[in-house]
Image: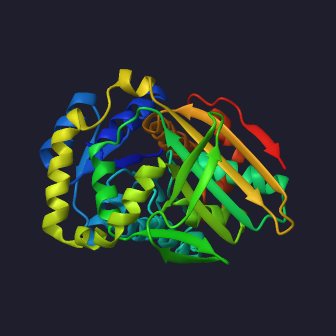
Amino acid sequence: MSKKLMLYGANGYTSRLIIKELVGQNIKPILAGRNKDKINNLAEKHGFDSSVFSLEKSDNIDEKLEDIDVLINAAGPYSLTAKPLIDSCIRAKTHYVDITGEIDVFVYAESKHKEAKDAGIIICPGVGFDVIPTDCLSYLLKDKLPDANELNICFFSENGRPSIGTAKTSIEGLSNGGKIRKDGIIEQVLLAHSVKEIDYGQGPKMAMSIPWGDVATAYYSTGIQNIIVYTPRSEAGINKIRKQRKWLFILKLKFVQNYLKNKMEKKIINGGDTDEQRAKSKMWVWAEVKNKDGKIESGYFQIANGYDVTGYGAMFFAKNLMENTFDGGYYTPSLLLGPNIVESLPGFSGIKFSNS
């Protein structure tokens, strides 16, 4: 009997790219989500089966996942969708992957390791641009400096724009400020808490700390106790954010979030960039590890647009789970399939390592 794959949140922008990758591998997913008309129309267009359900009732989710072997969750914000789907996947004995970059989701997923192991299933969130490339680079650098106790990560997009879903998730996350890992513990800090000059092959650039998924996942993959994730920003931009961050609490207000989300929807045409626009947009990934003696190992590389990487990554991990057998439990991407999977990502340039 052939194995069944379900894509939940199938009508989103990134899901279009995941579907394209799956079709290229002759995989016919069951398209699922909450919007009956959109899901059924999409399934009819592709000639796929469909499944329509919300996540309010766990019994209903369990029933829908009963005969599913692998679930790809592409329905954000994952802070709302991951928990009920992970819990149901454990009960239904269904492998779970998603494309989140949200720290709290990774922490929750890791907390379900024993239950997933007992159920014989894999829980592996973050199988897109968040966090495959950064996770793999962190793992490889730790191999080069086994006693590293500090990890800094940075990524940068050339010309790319977020999808509507990503933009909405970012709006919700901004109100929570920043997060870093210090002495093994995730700490709440202010946005742009740390500033660093970083050179990822295009000359030194200023970068500020952001609350990104690797604060959780890189720790699980490497055991490094101190982790900060950065993204480039001009000095003027960093100063502006630091001046405004005391007002970020207003983003917790629902009407403010709705206003910003509606404004973002009008700004982002067709849900996100076209194929041609994405082809012109590349991503840079950089990281460094440091030990107590001050020795540093660093590396950087370029890959394709983050959404193309995500479409490929979701397919690649789901396909592996359908074709191979793994010991159950929670995994990061590098721990499940090994750090060298980074070499298979679209547009991978090869890693340029250096040390000091």
Q: Residue 65's quadrant in the figure?
A: bottom left
Query: Whole-percent x and y of residue 33?
Result: 25, 51
Q: Is residue 228 visible?
A: yes
Between 142 and 122, which is closer to the camera in this rendering?
A: 142
Between 322 and 234, which is closer to the camera in this rendering?
A: 234
Query: Whole-percent x and y of residue 86?
Result: 42, 66
Q: Is residue 326 visible?
A: no
Task: Identify the residue at image location x=55%, y=46%.
Answer: 155
Task: Identify the residue at image location x=58%, y=50%.
Answer: 154
Between 281 and 5, which is closer to the camera in this rendering?
A: 281
Query: Whole-percent x and y of residue 56?
Result: 23, 70
Q: Is residue 4 above or below residue 294?
A: above
Q: Residue 59's quadrant in the figure?
A: bottom left
Q: Is residue 243 left or right of residue 56?
A: right
Task: Identify the residue at image location x=48%, y=51%.
Answer: 235
Task: Identify the residue at image location x=37%, y=71%.
Answer: 176
